[in-house]
Amino acid sequence: MRPLSFRTPSQISAPGIETYVDLRRKSAAAIWLFRQPWQSVRELVAVRQPSSLTLAGEILGRMGLSEADQIQRDAHGRPTLPSESACDLSISHAGALWMLALSNGGRRVGVDIEGPRKVPRAVELAERYFPSAEVAMLKRLSPLSRERAFLRLWCAREAILKAHGRGIAFGLSRLQLSLTPTAVHLLECDPALGAVGEWRVREFVPARGMVGAVAWRGAAAVLRGLAIAI
């Protein structure tokens, strides 16, 4: 799994985030991952009643994006920006973290994070939701390795399906993944997802003990991380 450094705004040269994250510049082939403690998000919800979309809008507003106040959810619950925007976003939270992925250049993006947890029924769950080849792979692993591998497969799957737009309602078994110790790969997918070669999946570590994955369709991009506090 590739390391990803989450810098803070204080580590970015003045005059601020908007000069560092130029999402209007299509040549800036980056996908930004904004990390915030989930507890602070919950506190904000209690005090100010914002939703995750409101918080995402605040981040976009800091970067000078005119669509910051136009984030909505589509018929499947996916957060979206206006059709004329070249940007796309995805939201996830787990354990102690809330995460926003933001892309440009027409890349549809999805992000998912999973906290450290026991999955004693990993094989049983995989038999219910994953293709048989992935189930067989999990059965070959030790119990401890199996639990983490299951979380990695689940996380990457959710990221892909979020980027597609339907989420897990699309069907978890309609794509097949493979794992190496450092990466996850999309091997096959339902034609409704498009061609396998259109997809890019990158794993990252949101925080110690956690797993994360970001997926997108389109040209290659690098991941950039920013730890924030709104």
Image (cartoon, grey):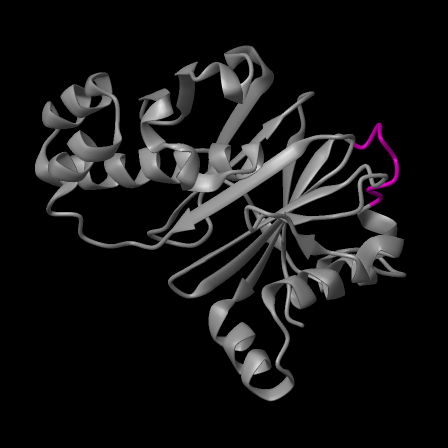
Left or right of residue 230, residue 163 in this image: left
Visible in this render: residue 213? Answer: no
Image quarter of the N terminus: top left
Q: Is residue 74 above or below residue 59?
A: above
x, y percent for residue 85: 83, 41
Find residue 54 and report its horizontal and vertical position in percent: 68, 67
Q: Which residues are magenta?
A: 22-28
| Residue located farthest toward the bottom when viewing the structure as drawn | 47
Q: Give me the residue at 46% from left, 45% from top.
A: 112
Front in this rendered view, residue 6 or 216: 216
- Which of these two is toward me, 83 or 37? 83
Q: Quadrant of residue 4?
A: top right
Q: Is residue 70 left or right of residue 53?
A: right
Q: Residue at point 82% right, 42% down?
A: 23
Compared to 130, does 82 lie above or below? below
To which quarter of the image does residue 11 belong? bottom right
In the rendered structure, does residue 187 fall within the stretch colored magenta?
Answer: no
Q: Nearest the camera: 127 or 4?
A: 127
Q: Is residue 147 left or right of residue 102?
A: left
Count the marks: how many? 0
* Coordinates of residue 121 in the picture (x, y in percent): 11, 44
Query: For the point 55% across and 55% down, which residue is it?
Result: 99
Q: Main secondary structure of the magenta part?
A: loop
| Quadrant in which the C terminus appears | bottom right
Residue 9 in sight here? yes
Residue 119 lies, with reference to residue 61, above or below; the image says above
Residue at far front of view: 75
Toward which corner of the image does residue 52 lie, by quadrant?
bottom right
